[in-house]
Image: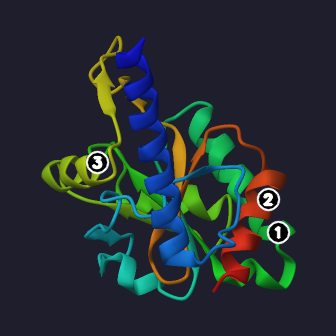
């Protein structure tokens, strides 16, 4: 019993320590979110990948905006288009503040997702969305940094394979700090509310 009490006390201390860390960064009135608050995470910090024009891009290119990053692939039948459509709805719901939201789509299937394919794909959801890709090695490196799982699943032919992958949005504040992880299916309205809070907090 005494051992269990000590374990509970230790767990409570960790929770309080986490709260103190958030308060230390953003004040006593740190905002509450619908998505998972991962403020202060030591992962999902940056990427170095190419856009469809071949330009090297990093998080620094998007400073001043709330950035939402989704990992997927263009042959995805459901999860990926649903996530990008939801993000486009959020951008529209933000009204005049929509220009302060940057959607980024990172492929986990650079073998099939050429710049031309990716450019056309994201444009179908919103003209402002940015598509990024890298070599197989770069893709593996950025997936490790963001703790993203992906795996090639063979199909009936060499080109008909699919990709298992993590499905969620990483959301960064205008200072380029990772703040939220939104699970797939969170809904456009709760995500819009969270992004408004990030914009309001500067």
Element at label 3: helix
Q: Are marks 1 and 2 in contact (CB under 8 Å)?
A: yes
Q: Residue at x 41, y 45 (%)?
A: 14
**Secondary structure state at the residue bearing disc 2:** helix
Closest to the observer: 175 or 156? 175
User: In terms of sequence position, does the residue under pointer 1 or pointer 3 come before the other?
Assistant: 1
User: Dividing the picture into quarters, in which one does residue 145 lie?
Assistant: bottom left
- Looking at the picture, how far across and down is residue 201, in whole percent? 67, 81
**Mark 1 and mark 2: span between their CA atoms?**
5 Å
Q: Are marks 3 and 2 in contact (CB under 8 Å)?
A: no
Mark 3 vs mark 2, CA separation in Å: 26 Å
Q: Nearer the viewer, mark 3 or mark 2?
A: 3
For numbered disc 1, what is the local secondary structure?
Answer: helix
Residue at 49% x, 63% y is 20
Residue 121 percent location from the top left of the image: 55, 55
User: In this rendering, does residue 68 appear at all?
Assistant: yes
**Above or below for 157 versus 122:** above
Between disc 1 and disc 3, the foreground one is: 3
Q: Which residue is mark 2?
A: 89
Between 160 and 190, the one lying in front of the other is: 190
Q: Residue at x 33, y 66 (%)?
A: 45
Where is residue 105 shown, x and y percent of the image? 48, 58
Residue 187 position by quadrant: top right
Of callouts 3 and 2, the N-terminal one: 2
Marking on residue 143? 3
Percent from the top left, x then y, of residue 188? 79, 52
Residue at the disc numbered 1? 92
Q: CA distance from mark 1 to mark 3?
A: 29 Å
Left or right: residue 56 versus residue 9 is left
Q: Quadrant of the N terminus?
A: top left
Label 2: how many Cα within 10 Å (few below 14, some 14–19, many 20+): some
Colour logic: rainbow
């Amino acid at each position: 019993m005494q051992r269990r009490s000590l374990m509970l006390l230790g767990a409570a201390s960790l929770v309080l320590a986490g709260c103190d860390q958030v308060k230390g960064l953003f004040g006593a009135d740190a905002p509450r979110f619908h998505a998972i608050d991962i403020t202060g995470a030591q992962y999902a910090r940056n990427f170095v990948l190419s856009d469809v024009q071949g330009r090297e891009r990093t998080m620094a290119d998007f400073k001043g905006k709330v950035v939402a990053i989704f990992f997927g692939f263009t042959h995805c039948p459901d999860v990926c288009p649903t996530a990008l459509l939801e993000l486009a709805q959020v951008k529209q719901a933000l009204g005049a503040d929509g220009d302060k939201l940057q959607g980024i789509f990172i492929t986990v299937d650079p073998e099939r997702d050429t710049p031309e394919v990716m450019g056309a794909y994201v444009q179908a959801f919103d003209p402002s969305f940015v598509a990024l890709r890298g070599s197989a090695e770069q893709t593996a490196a950025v997936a490790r940094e963001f703790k993203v799982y992906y795996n090639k699943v063979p199909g009936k032919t060499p080109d008909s394979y699919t990709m298992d992958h993590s499905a969620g949005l990483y959301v960064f504040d205008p200072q380029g700090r990772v703040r939220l992880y939104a699970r797939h299916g969170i809904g456009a309205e709760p995500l819009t509310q969270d992004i408004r809070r990030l914009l309001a907090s500067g």
